Amino acid sequence: MSHLMPTYSPLPVTFVKGEGVWLWDDKGQRYLDALAGIAVCGLGHCHPKLSEAVCEQAKTLIHTSNLYHIDKQEKLATKLVSLSGMDNVYFCNSGAEANEAAIKLARLHGHNKGIDLPTIIVMEQSFHGRTMATLTASGNRKVQAGFEPLLTGFVRVPYNNIDAVNHVAIHNKNIVAVLVEPYQGEGGVNIPQAQYLQDLRRICDENNWFLMLDEVQCGIGRSGKWFAFQHSAIVPDVMTLAKGLGSGVAIGACLANGKASGVFKPGNHASTFGGNPLACAAAFATLNIIEEENLISHAMKLGNFIRDRLKQSLTGETGVVQIRGQGLMIGIELAVPCSGLVTKALERGLLINVTSDKVVRLLPALVMQLDEAEQVVESTSAIIKEFLHNVDN
Ligand SMILES: *Cc1c(COP(=O)(O)O)cnc(C)c1O
């Protein structure tokens, strides 16, 4: 009998080894991984250089405390700042914590301006995490139900709808920030119109609000740029990172730019583990390996290839609503709920995901090769076709 709290419903498989985009279970069966630990293992499993950097650091120094200078943290911050064009970084241990930091930063900024009830605009279908503040910010009743009372200080608008944001700007004088995913992940791989971030940037500038981008899922190369905002020729005030940053060693980051970079003062926020030497070594190695192996442009090409091939294979199939995405965030929306596809894929040795009930989601590692991607396309298409034909019957 399991002594774990039943917060998850794990699939009946136990992986014991990984290499590149392949995983092996405890029976020796091999699986092609098109999910990468939900966008975490961008370098694939156990990239030799990453494993070496983690082992080296584990043998030298794992943890001290933020009571002391941490050289690896300084180096990682400098690297993130140079890649993003932002000004400074706060390190934590997860995506929810990174967003929690962003929310606190925005509220403090509001109070500094004399706004007693600082309020943040958030989006429908968004996902920002499972802490009380981040589940309140999330646009998904399933993550909130049963945990009321929720926090105050959030107003929700439809995603990809600038008029709705303008409307709030006119009627609510307590707004201090907009928190938004440049591309929504859990909400169904939703890609807004091309001008969306530019329009949000302009509204934020006009109203003296912070534009806060949750790049926990789409950041670190997955979109085909280092950061999704770099597709839009804007810079946010705040950006949060986590999933792909440490390749599976827990680390999150909240970056700030300009005025936002001066909001937190000593004592305002802290984390015991945040940015410890081990986590920073993993993240620093991750960024360097992505750079050395040109994985950003590869992610862009591979994403286009996968979407093109999926379209060739699935267009015209009744029940396939849309194939969409950006870089290696790929969604196939079906007309009917399809969470059962995950087990069907597993039985064929393929790891995929279904989000928002009807969207098959692929989040392959940035290191996936073309022939492996072709296998993902063939298996995924076959499973979807089989599923749709059975539904028809
Ligand atoms: C996964 C995710 C989070 C939450 O990250 P955790 O590390 O699970 O706390 C927040 N925002 C987005 C966009 C995510 O995809």
Image (tube, rainbow, N blue to C red):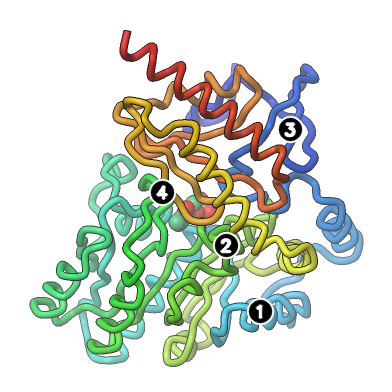
Residue 136: which quarter of the image?
A: bottom left
What residue sits right under mark 1 in the picture? Answer: 77
At label 3, the amino acid type is Leu
At label 4, the amino acid type is Val
Q: CA distance from mark 4 to mark 1?
A: 29 Å
Q: Earlier in the sequence, mark 4 or mark 2?
A: 4
Tell me: residue 181, above or below residue 265. Answer: above
What residue sits right under mark 4 in the picture? Answer: 189
Density class for disc 1 (Cα within 10 Å; few <14, some 14-19, many ≥20) is many
Residue 163: which quarter of the image?
A: bottom left
Q: Is mark 2 within 8 Å of ligand 1?
A: no
Density class for disc 2 (Cα within 10 Å; few <14, some 14-19, many ≥20) is many
Q: CA distance from mark 1 to mark 2?
A: 22 Å
Density class for disc 4 (Cα within 10 Å; few <14, some 14-19, many ≥20) is many
Q: Earlier in the sequence, mark 3 or mark 2?
A: 3
- Name the residue nearer the viewer: 173 or 367: 367
Tag shown at residue 224: 2
Tag shown at residue 23: 3
State if disc 2 and disc 4 touch (CB < 8 Å).
no
